[in-house]
Image (tube, grey):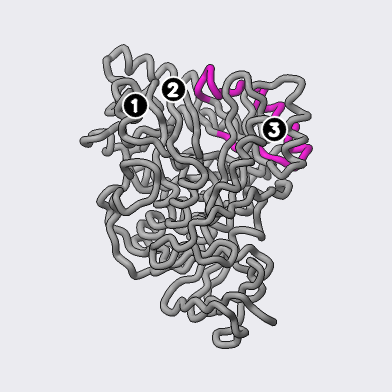
């Protein structure tokens, strides 16, 4: 056995086990996990003594250069993936969301072509908004080309919202092709009524965000979409679930045999709606909104119960100028928070260090399970032999403070400004290449690839 790179002296952490091992890499892939001290000689030896050695994070929910309403997020693939690798994420899953009049397949293929601009690999969710006679063939083409997941929305009427019949038809078609709907669930009629009442009361600005999109809108929509999936025997993945009640509805459906999965995102697991009473409430406007502290605590408990499948970022890289320009009316504001770089450090510090989440469960939530759910495992999300050599060497003892000036996202703020964290990615490898060393970008060459997803099982 020969090697190009050996990562030695660290504690390997997989989703199902952890222990001392040396990682042997050749031609960009992991070839072995060797007993400490038994790895072959290599041209490059990376010392991971006293560190955790983990598979690179897989972020299942990133919006790169995303246009919604009058606003477009500010990063491209190079900028987004630069931030991602600094945060320990080595694969992102982006969205190709059509504007009115565009075909889902055309938009997906155009977005897929941007993958080569990235510093790490990416996969893609397509999106269906309205059903017509061309959609089945477009879905078949997309799945055959390795784009097997399709985003849908039950809100944002007149822009991206799909009606119930379109959801049912899309689920049915994808189930027969080996694909899956990933869905944003908020009942638009409940949201619309809440927004009208808030507007009538003169309370429709950023400080009032939580009241404009109540948790009931989410649970009502989740229940309806689960019923559709169950009726047609289709799998379904719920993005950014923000309440324990929504997660528990999905868990109950799984117990009935529905292939249903829950994603939570970092900001819903760490931040609460007190942010809307602060100095810059517009910086925290996202959909679903931040919830009360008790709801955040209840949601976080499901990281421990296993009911949450994955943790993503829902990264939307708007800046303060964009956020402040419509802060008086959340119906017109850009919704979303920057987070691709902070997802792993924030969850590790808040849940592994402070609350005792097993580090194996952390790796499952941020790497292995997102890879499985998106048809990328075992190429991504693991360090088992045959996997891409996307490796994060993690210093669990480093204490540091989040400041915007030290981050790499294409924006001028972070919702976690000033938060003190424990643990950080120290060295990051993509395909066996060291791209970040001691927190510094050492290889800025864009070598990203679009990774084709396997059929959903």
Say if 399 sits above or below 270 in the image: below
The residue that appears at 55% across and 53% down in the rendered structure is 446
User: Which label sits in the foreground, 3 or 2?
Assistant: 2
Residue located 64% across and 28% down the image: 128
Instruction: Tell me: 109 left or right of 159.
Output: right
Magenta segment boundaries in residue numbering? 155-183
Determine whether, in the image, residue 73 is placed left or right of residue 369.
left
Residue 235 visible in the snapshot: no
Q: Distance between the residues labelled 3 and 2?
A: 30 Å
| Contact, mark 2 vs mark 1 (Cβ under 8 Å) | no
- Using the numbered discs, state the Cα–Cα distance from disc 3 to disc 1 in whole angstroms: 31 Å
Residue at image position (53%, 29%) is 221
Q: Residues within 10 Å of mark 1 (few under 14, many from 20)?
A: some
- Per the image, the residue denoted by label 1 is 211
According to the picture, the residue beneath numbered tag 2 turns out to be 70
The one of 68 and 175 positioned closer to us in this rendering: 68
Query: Disc 3 designates what residue?
Result: 171
């Amino acid at each position: 056995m020969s090697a190009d790179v050996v990562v030695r002296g660290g504690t390997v952490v997989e989703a199902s086990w952890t222990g001392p091992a040396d990682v042997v890499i050749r031609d960009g892939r992991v070839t072995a996990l060797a007993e400490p001290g038994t790895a072959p000689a290599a041209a490059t030896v990376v010392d991971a003594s006293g560190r955790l050695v983990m598979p690179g994070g897989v972020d299942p929910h990133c919006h790169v250069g995303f246009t919604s309403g009058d606003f477009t997020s500010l990063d491209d693939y190079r900028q987004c993936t630069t931030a991602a690798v600094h945060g320990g994420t080595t694969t992102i899953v982006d969205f190709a969301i059509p504007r009115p009049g565009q075909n889902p397949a055309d938009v997906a293929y155009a977005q897929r072509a941007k993958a080569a601009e990235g510093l790490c690999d990416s996969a893609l969710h397509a999106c269906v908004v309205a059903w017509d006679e061309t959609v089945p063939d477009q879905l078949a083409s997309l799945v055959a080309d390795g784009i097997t997941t399709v985003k849908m929305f039950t809100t944002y009427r007149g822009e991206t919202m799909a009606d119930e019949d379109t959801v049912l038809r899309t689920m049915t078609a994808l189930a027969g092709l080996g694909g899956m709907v990933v869905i944003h669930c908020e009942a638009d009629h409940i949201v619309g009524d809440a927004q009208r009442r808030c507007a009538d009361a003169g309370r429709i600005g950023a400080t009032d965000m939580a009241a404009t999109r109540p948790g009931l809108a989410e649970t009502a929509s989740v229940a309806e979409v689960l019923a559709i999936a169950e009726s047609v025997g289709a799998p379904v993945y719920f993005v950014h679930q923000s309440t324990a009640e929504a997660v528990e509805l999905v868990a109950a459906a799984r117990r009935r045999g529905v292939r249903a999965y829950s994603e939570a995102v970092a900001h819903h697991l760490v931040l609460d709606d007190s942010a809307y009473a602060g100095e810059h409430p517009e910086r925290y406007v996202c959909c679903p909104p931040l919830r009360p502290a008790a709801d955040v605590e209840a949601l976080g408990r499901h990281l421990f119960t296993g009911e949450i499948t994955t943790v993503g970022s829902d990264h939307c890289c708007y800046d303060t100028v964009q956020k402040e320009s419509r802060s008086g009316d959340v119906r017109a504001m850009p919704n979303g928070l920057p987070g691709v770089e902070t997802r792993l450090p924030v969850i590790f510090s808040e849940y592994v260090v402070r609350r005792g989440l097993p580090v194996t469960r952390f790796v499952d939530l941020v790497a292995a399970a997102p890879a499985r759910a998106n048809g990328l495992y075992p190429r991504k999300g693991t360090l088992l032999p045959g996997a891409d050599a996307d490796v994060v060497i993690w210093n669990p003892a480093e204490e540091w403070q989040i400041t915007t000036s030290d981050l790499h996202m294409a924006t001028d703020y972070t919702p976690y400004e000033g938060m003190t964290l424990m643990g950080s990615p120290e060295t990051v490898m993509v395909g066996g290449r060291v791209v970040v060393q001691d927190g510094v970008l050492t290889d800025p060459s864009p070598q990203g690839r679009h990774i084709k997803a396997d059929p959903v099982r």
